[in-house]
Amino acid sequence: MLNLEELLLGFSTLVLVSIFIARISNNLGVPVLLLFLGVGMMAGSEGPGNIAFDDTGLAQSIGICSLIFILFSGGLATHWNIVKPVLWPSLSLATLGVALTAGTVAIFANLVFNVPLLISLLLGSIVASTDAAAVFSIIGARNIKIKGKITPLLELESGSNDPMAVFLTIALIELIKVPEVSFLRLSLQFVMEMGIGLAMGLGLGKSIVFIINRLKIPIEGLYQVFVFAGAFFVYASTNLLHGSGFLAVYVAGMVVGNNNIVHKKNVFRFFDGMAWVAQIVMFLTLGLLVYPSHILTNFKTELSISLFLIIIARPLGVFISLMPFKFSIKEKIFISWVGLRGAVPIILATFPMLAGIYEAQWIFNVVFFIVITSALLQGWTIPFALDLLKLKDTYTPFITSPTEFNHLDEVDRVRINMIVPDNATFNNQSIVSIKALQGCLIITVKRGDTYFVPSGGTILKSGDYLQALVSQSKVEELKSILEVSQ
């Protein structure tokens, strides 16, 4: 048995290697989940690390705790004003879209490979949810902006479709073990779980905001600890009331993130870091759990189901669930293509194993194969799909600045990014002489790959990116002469 020092050395080494590899993934355009899983598999019993790990229950617990961090952090980063216009199409994708995807995969597995119908439905339910974090890690690494409302749609869908997949998975396991369970009972159970989850998320999220703004603790670090404990409290208390804990955590994160709280920047930083730690630990654990040799035992079956999910099932779910909403064919094709599978399906694949389902190991192997092929096939091709469908926003400036600034809603100043267009009348003029920029505080200028802090005498040139603090009332005026984004 390993002593504490050996365990800590092994764990820290795996995390450090994963972080180093994550940096490489940005250049390769590969979702980090794939590389983290790879590190875990290399460290596992069939890899050079030779670490024997087969504790499915522990892996599931680590996965659930990690998802609490990831979903709460995702909720914190979700801006309500941005996602509000796509609320209904996102919910349609997260419910009807998930159900259609699950059902279509089930029919295919049942008819083509003679998999029992309930087992097919269980498999479809497990792989029905998407992982937008994998998509945005690729898009963010390449500074890509997408036209239209696709980004907020994917963002909200990814945070709200996990509860649906979890419910379907648990419901199918119950049906397999107790076939007498009625459809009416399951329907009422679904409404109750989602209703309780939404109500608890809203209520407890507002409670966290109310309390944290009145704590007046002299130790700043305890504010992050309070929100940390609050996230777990939201999940646990909601589950004890038979609600959807995952939905409650995501909603609570949104409530906290869209309100002013003390030390808000530090809370955001803490959860962003912890969400990355959670992802690394979760993927490493799941990688350790898998036996690579077992994954390829049914290669043709696994590949067929994976390709069917990517090419047929996901697009069918997207096109039907988005029919009532105004999205173009190109947008629907792209939304279909970026439906990457991530950690949630692998975690859900441990549920049948713990429930003692006979086909559980086969399901786990198929799900793991689907996640890997989805990351490889879809992950690498996202930038090409954007170019092919002409959905890349080449006009909206996208600037990543080393300058940090978080404005409060009550302050009449916002940070905006601007680009000096080729046809600007003030090209080659100094900042101080440009009337439109009077009253603006230019924080940084990006010219080529160089950042610098300008002075009033700085000459602006075509293509310069500016980051500025301006009055909210001046934003529309600037938009008429500059390309502006917030």
Image (tube, helix red, strand yellow):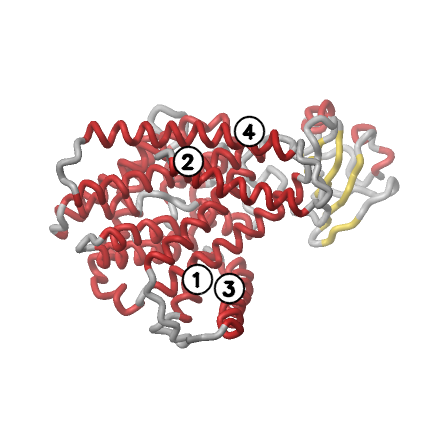
Q: Please, what secondary structure does the residue beneath circle 1 have?
A: helix
Q: Which mark is residue 18?
A: 3
Q: Nearer the viewer, mark 3 or mark 2?
A: 2
Q: What amino acid is at disc 1? A: Leu
Q: What amino acid is at disc 2? A: Thr
Residue of label 1: 284
Can the viewer see residue 411? Answer: yes
Q: Give whichever of discs 1 and 2 has the lower sequence position.
A: 2
- Marks 3 and 4, Cα distance to the nearest angstrom? 36 Å
Q: Is residue 93 left or right of residue 269?
A: left
In what quadrant of the picture does the N terminus appear? bottom left
Q: Please, what secondary structure does the residue beneath circle 3 have?
A: helix
- Marks 4 and 1, Cα distance to the nearest angstrom? 34 Å
Indicate whether 290 appears above or below 275: below
Q: Nearer the viewer, mark 4 or mark 1?
A: 4
- Marks 1 and 2, Cα distance to the nearest angstrom? 28 Å
Q: Give whichever of discs 1 and 3 has the lower sequence position.
A: 3
Task: Mark 1 and mark 2 in contact? Answer it, CB < 8 Å.
Answer: no
What's the residue at 66%, 32% (across, down)? 213
Can the viewer see residue 421? Answer: no
Q: What amino acid is at disc 4? A: Lys
Residue of label 4: 206
Which x, y percent locates residue 153? 45, 34
Residue of label 2: 238
- Marks 1 and 3, Cα distance to the nearest angstrom? 9 Å
Q: Residues within 10 Å of mark 1 (few under 14, many from 20)?
A: many
Q: Give whichever of discs 4 and 1 has the lower sequence position.
A: 4
Q: Give whichever of discs 3 and 4 has the lower sequence position.
A: 3
Task: Mark 1 and mark 3 in contact? Answer it, CB < 8 Å.
Answer: yes
Which x, y percent locates residue 235? 44, 40
